[in-house]
Image: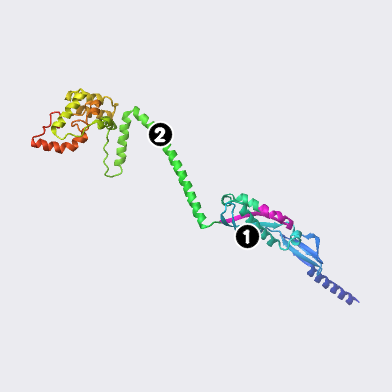
Amino acid sequence: MIEELVTAGAATASAGALYVMAAARVVKQYERGVVFRLGRLLPEVRRPGLTLVVPIVDRLHKVSLQIITLPIPAQEGITRDNVTVRVDAVVYFKVVNPSDALVRVEDYRFAVSQMAQTSLRSIIGKSELDDLLSNREKLNQGLELMIDNPAVEWGVTIDRVEIKDVSLPETMKRSMARQAEADRERRARVINADAELQASKKLAGAAQVMSEQPAALQLRLLQTVVAVAAEKNSTLVLPFPVELLRFLERAAPLPGAQEAGASPASSGQGATAATAATAASAGEAADPEALAAQARELAGEFPPGTSGDVVRQLLEGLGEKGVPGLVGERAVSEAEPGTPGTLAGAEGEGEGEERTDAEGADGSGDAPGEDGTRG
């Protein structure tokens, strides 16, 4: 009797151990268990740990609640501004309702992948190329909303969507590179022009200060000479007063005098007559004293300073030596272009010099006068 009881107890214990072994299930921390009993979904979701199901009757399905990373294959499309691009992205999602993820959709992973590809092609067609390249945050949010709306019914929530890369055709890349280069060149020119404007204002102020202090211009000239000499080159710098150039410009013949003037004289007697006519029309004698007085008068018009002093000394020296040609603006303007001994006849004198010398050698021409005028 006792042996039968012991045998029955051992058999019961063995059956219980076998049942526990067949019914015991372990659910991990990041998982949830969904039980189907005879094909029907039980409302209770099994928590992490050890859980028991009815063998042969129940079926336990484990669903992971971890965030799943799903890459979206590259999709090729045409943007709103008619540019062909190739875009790929990545989707991060997780299951929030294990029962709906198993019941409402056959394979939630595949469903999310297909929805992401469709939404990506749609967002490409609605966007412009500049938005795809520079405004990706807004596109990511729009793409996330497009995928998340149907995924909520599947027990899935979209954590985030990121556009990884935008591939452009080679011709478009070259066009964009040229556009960027042109824009950078435009900005560089604007900056350079602004710098020139500021520099011109500063130079104008510096010129005003130097005009008040003429010695400053001479100091600046010396600094320039020192800077050129420091480069160890063979450059020769010869400072030339600007006032002298202005004097020569004022002494130049007027256009009316050139039109009214006659051609250069063909003989020494004609040149002498033209010189006498010029002196007579001016009403002034071409003597050294008058020339010196006129030179001193012209030299007094230049401002004081180093350059003005040089010009005044040069003009006074020319007048004291009796150099013809300094007979005033009236005489110069009324003189004929071919008149020797004047600034107006400087061009004609160079052309007729050889002819005059030849006639003087034969005795037909007059010798040069004491005042320097070639007869």
Identify the residue at horizontal 32%, vertical 32% (top origin): 217
Residue 358: % across, % down: 11, 38
Q: Give the quarter of the figure containing the N terminus.
A: bottom right
- Give yes or no for residue 288 being in the magenta stretch: no
State the extent of the magenta-drawn residues as a range. Answer: 144-166
Front residue of this view, candidates 217 and 11: 217
Looking at the rendered structure, the kind of residue marked 1 is: Pro
Q: Is residue 4 left or right of residue 306?
A: right
Q: CA distance from mark 1 to mark 2?
A: 61 Å
Front residue of this view, candidates 256 and 299: 256
Residue 186 visible in the displayed image: yes
Looking at the rendered structure, the kind of residue marked 2 is: Lys
**344 to 133, vertically: above or below:** above
Front residue of this view, candidates 276 and 81: 276
> Which residue carries the number 2 mark?
202
> Which residue carries the number 1 mark?
71
Residue 69: % across, % down: 65, 59
> In the structure shown, which secondary structural element does the residue marked by tag 1 occupy?
strand
Q: Are marks 1 and 2 in contact (CB under 8 Å)?
A: no
Q: Is residue 126 left or right of residue 375?
A: right
Q: Is residue 163 left or right of residue 285?
A: right
